[in-house]
Image (tube, rainbow, N blue to C red):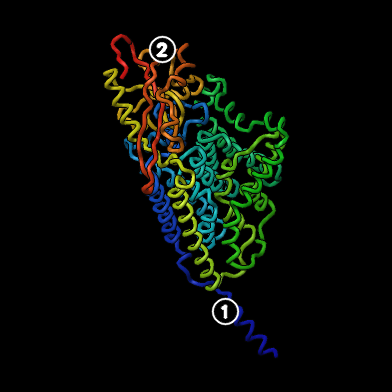
Amino acid sequence: MPDADADMTAILASNAKPLTSPLDDGRTAAALLVLHLLIWTALPLLVSRNLPLDMVEALAWGREWQWGYYKHPPLSGWLAEMARLGPSNWSLFLLAQLMVTGGMAASWALGRELLGTRLATLGLMATEGVHYFNMSSTEFNANVVMFPLWAGASLCGWRALRSGKLGWWMALGLCCGLGTLGKYVFLLLPACLVLYTWLNPVARQAWRTAGPWAAAAVFLLVIAPHLKWAIDHDWATLHYALGRGHSDELAQQGNWRQEFIHFVLAQALTLLPAWGLLRTLGARHPTQRPAHERWLLFTLGLAPLLLIMLAATLAQAKMLHMWASPFFLCAVPLWLAWRQPTLLDTSRLTRFTWAWSAWMLITVAIFASTALLGPQKKHKLDRTGYPGQEIAAILTAKWHTQTGRPLSIVAGEEFVAGTVAHYSADRPSVFYDADFSESMWLRPEQVEQQGAVFVWPLSRGEVDVADLPPDSRAQVAPLLARYPALQAQPTLLVHSTWLGKPYTVAVAWAVLPPPPSQNFSAR
């Protein structure tokens, strides 16, 4: 019996030896990131002909190069403008995935530091289970901008607190400053790190060094111009952010708890596929780490989500599901640093790889089928199927014919106005809803001197042509007190098809001619 026990121990020890695997090579992770970049850049290009709302909105902001906009800080607009290559779409879809893969690369780097290359790469693959980073990531917006900066700040925060090196503290301040210029919700991460360093006795020692103070100085230096803009504009962006929660309305309706439960369930379901992928790796065991490191893992991985839920509870405010999207970029490696698989043998790695491959195919199929078949089901074109280039070309040509001047301003509903502005050869400024509080880059005298095309959406194919108004008199009437020269135009009809099915898109439009108005003739 002793010999048999010894033999069994030897067999188990042999099975427990680390297996050589491509996962041990960092080039595998790089290849996976390139694969992600190619798939999720190409897919929206193949199933879209018009940019989605958030993208045309970011382009309208970026054109103006302001230090802030009424909805968001400036970074998303700036990046969109820098990535714009004429009226083409591909560079904007590529930009979105550069943000995603940049965030996933930083998450992998953090995972490699915590877990080693193999587990870090498995964590990178499992992160594909979070739809925020594939199916929901194709639309470049202020949420997507945060991805590389959130993961970068998590990596820098870990290294700064572990090593105490001034360079990592300054990099942390830079990431947090740029992230805040992307969206205010980013402030949750530095807030959680500050709380951790205050409450944890070991981490509290960092405040006796120059590191945290240097990080704070870099952070303030980065956001200072935006802070000045915000003060000068009565904190317009903050008012908008708070307004999205509709706390008074929710409290009056008594449905705040329902909204809160929806948010929690949405985040749980979002993490479920990633958890399922990790389950294929078999049983896990707690890792042996000092208490202060375990609390740091908790701070980086879960504290921002709990903090936003606490804030919403106190304010009884609504939380939009996508607000939590950056929180989960490092969730998988941080979880694996807490509880690791007991044994990674060949069968489990094979099972994980097959499950990951199946999930990738499922996400591609869901995204493509939704984009392609959505209009058939809803009986109207999606925004990504909108004939924006045709509409922009027609309205720009009509403006040229009627005024003999370049189109400088397009006013009206955010999507149609933004679409015309992006695809028009004149690249006009957008006058959102004819509201200067939403278009703070414009002044009343500019609109009067340069004139504008006003646009309103009537139909994306869901309204019968016979039921459409013949012109825009109904839309123009409320604006005549401000713009007496505003002239209604015949409803613009653009015939389009999607997967062989015809749709008639209708746009109401009007012209505010530049002076002298007596040389203008409506057509």
Q: Residues within 10 Å of mark 2 (few under 14, many from 20)?
A: few
Residue in front for this viewpoint, 115 or 389:
389
How many numbered marks, from 0 up?
2
Judged by depth in the image, the label closer to the viewer, 2 or 1, is: 2
Q: What quarter of the picture does the N terminus occupy?
A: bottom right
Mark closest to the chain's N terminus, 2 or 1: 1
Give the left or right position of residue 397, taking residue 25 as reference. left
Residue 302 location in percent, x, y? 64, 48
Residue type at the position of mark 2: Glu
Residue bearing the label numbered 1: 14
Residue bearing the label numbered 2: 445
User: Image point 56% across, 74% down: which residue?
Assistant: 17
- Say which element carries label 1: helix
Q: Residue furthest front?
A: 466
Residue 329 location in percent, x, y? 54, 49
User: Image point 62% across, 48% down: which residue?
Assistant: 267
- Say which element carries label 2: helix
Q: What quarter of the picture does the C terminus occupy?
A: top left
Residue type at the position of mark 1: Ser
Q: Are marks 2 and 1 in contact (CB under 8 Å)?
A: no
